Image (cartoon, rainbow, N blue to C red):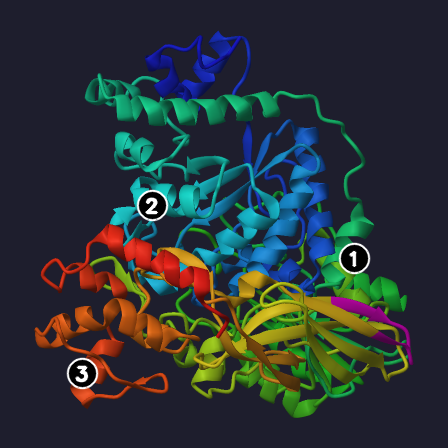
Amino acid sequence: MLSQEALTRKEKIKLLSGKSGDEIAEKYGTRYVTMSDGPHGVRKHGVCYPNMCLMSCSWDPKLLFEMGECIGQDCIAEGIDVLLGPSVNIKRTPLCGRNFEYISEDPYLAGVLGAEYIRGIQSTGTSACVKHFCCYNQENNRFTQNVYVDEETLMNVYVRVFRIIIEKSSPDYLMTAYNNVNGDFMSENRKLIQNVLRELLGYRGIVITDWGGVDFRLKSILAGVDINMPGDKDTSWKEVEEKTRGSKDFDALLNESTKRVIAALEKATKPKSREKSADASVLRRMAAESMVLLKNEGLLPLGEKEEIAVIGKLATDPCFQGGGCAFVKGESNRSPYEELCAHFCRKLPFAEGYTDEISENESRAPEIAAKADKVLFFAGLLPDEESEGYDRTDIFLPEKQVSILKQIYKVNRNVIVVLTNGSALDLTEVSNHCGAILECYYGGDQYAQACVDILTGKVNPCGRLAETFPCALSDCPSFKYGVDKNDTVVYKEGEDIGYKHYLSHHIRPRYAFGYGLSYTDFAYEDMAVSKESAWNEVQVEVTVRNTGNRAGKEVVQIYLQHQEEAAPSLAGFTKVSLEPGESVCVKIPIESGCFERYNLHKKCYEKRSGEYLVSVRKDSEQVIFEKPLQISKKFVCTRYTKIDELRKIENGPLYIQKYFSSCIGMAVLGKPDYKLRFKGNEIDDEPFVRNVSYSMPLYIFTTLTAGMLNNAQLDEIIAKINQGVACT
């Protein structure tokens, strides 16, 4: 029987590595965990779900839970214990070759949707492995790149998504990224794994490395990594054992990791019930619920009696997923062209339009377009343009596609562009040469069927963009800050990621974060903001009415902006289904975490008081309603409280005069008998004394007053202040 007591020290070290761990598990009559790539299907199973770039546009947590639940069942069918997904890395740049795997540019949306996907997987008994922790935002030089990011940006953007996921879903596994962060490989980054992930975020699951993502295995164990993947049988454990012999600190870490891994093996070997997996109709619904209608000048949905021409190789040879380790050998055997012909019960005029080489089909495209009522032009990125392992070089559609589109538009203005791609594109030329655009991203096995459901009106589009589509690559916040010749990338844009960059710099994107059209219309009425207490139970109420003649779904989006911020952040959302003429009052809570920021001094997240602006929006750019919200909190005095903060609270000047007047006199003027004067809550003294005093944190009086105040005395004073202060 495998137990911590039965294992020797050598066996414990070997257990924490994939290949040698398998050997130890077998010795003790059990087996090691089996893992498979995700995130949009079990790699060897043969069912390709809509890729995360599309599923995230559903803005529907329930749909993500259902997807996770179905994939969890697929894992059981294939004997897989751990699905390596979801990938929740922030979409810092649209050039990232792996963006099709990722959820969003926004940490809140990525966290909420990712957590539901994990909950769905783990509801089946299968384990999820969230990845890649952290700052893994480009593929070029991914093994060696050095990311340098300031601590506030790191914690408020790139760590925040993992914080939300851990709080909401408790993933069983977490994978470290390949890259360096601020000087250390992530698999050896004790500060981020032990101090942040384990201690601050409270993560209790297994930490594994990406495949080959370890430089020195001993350093990774010391940093807090539990399992080295894929590991080896006979080499790395020897070095670890030799260098740590007699180390009690190492043995303590080794025992903690061993305990976690044994518990994970016990879970993996428990019997799991196999229920029915997702059939084609479920995959079709998931894809259709997520596709985004970007433009529609009355061309969609298609009429049954209209003459429709179909142009584009991607109509007959579609691309429905990205490449790399996430690639699933799918079961799709239908193309959009076949589905369209089946729907209209006739063979529609078709031309490839563009190929890898010049062909006669290119000259036929304008000819058949001129004879049609409407033209469906299938465009997008071709296979191998988006994949793990390398980044894109630009965000344009292939030049041949744009050239054919322009030719078609000259002879017929009723052009509908159908897109397949895994990340944001520059759609300037496309938008100028068509009357409608349907963004399908990568739709998985049922892409063709779902696409035709939207085009023909069987399904009313209700997807919303989970990323910003810029007018130009140069508009993107990370455009100037790529990987340099030394494999270094500095996140100089700070927290201005995605839509926050466009809002704070007053740059209008081509299509905004959260944007999407419908075949019906929605009106908003009667916004209200209620607050039961300082932080919890902040709730936004708004009435939404379907004013059109079709049933449809609307995504209601709530944004929150602190008085010190240049742009708002997504803080809540819900998706509602309404019949024509129907209205509903939706109530959306703003979670307390949305009021929190990372405190550099205290090394923790804390709530921020002050004036907020709460807005209901159609997308990040379109404000419908906005109202102010005043948040106050009970003042808590600490060593890092400044005199400027202390003076503003009730009785603050009295505390300062009683406890710190002499200290300030000594620290500022070298005069321990100096008496501060106050006028109201302002220090009534010359500007030098006043302003220097305001900037001083309380701890400085233990070091700058020649022994007038020690730490114990300061702690006692702080306790007295906290017993008597009132709210600001």
Can residue 396 be seen?
yes
Which of pointers 3 and 1 lies earlier in the amino acid sequence? 1
Where, by quadrant of the figure, is residue 599 drawn?
bottom left
Which of pointers 1 and 2 lies earlier in the amino acid sequence? 2
- Chain part drawn in magenta: 575-584
Can residue 236 be seen?
no
Q: CA distance from mark 3 to mark 2?
A: 46 Å
Tell me where residue 435 appears, x and y as whole percent: 69, 86
Residue placed most toward the observer, 421 or 579: 579
* Residue at which label 2 appears: 186
Q: CA distance from mark 3 to mark 1?
A: 68 Å
Label 3 crowd bin: few (<14), some (14–19), many (20+), radius 10 Å: some
The residue lying at 12 percent from left, 58 percent from top is: 707
Of circles 3 and 1, the one toward us is 3
Secondary structure of the residue carrying tag 1 is helix
Secondary structure of the residue carrying tag 3 is helix
The residue lying at 67 percent from left, 32 percent from top is: 125
| Three-letter amino acid code of the residue under disc 2 | Met
- Reply yes or no: does residue 690 show up in magenta: no
Of circles 3 and 2, the one toward us is 3
Label 1 crowd bin: few (<14), some (14–19), many (20+), radius 10 Å: some
| Three-letter amino acid code of the residue under disc 1 | Arg
Tell me where residue 44 appears, x and y as whole percent: 61, 36
Residue placed most toward the observer, 235 or 7: 7
Residue placed most toward the observer, 414 or 367: 414
Residue placed most toward the observer, 578 or 382: 578
* Residue at which label 1 appears: 285
* Residue at which label 3 appears: 689
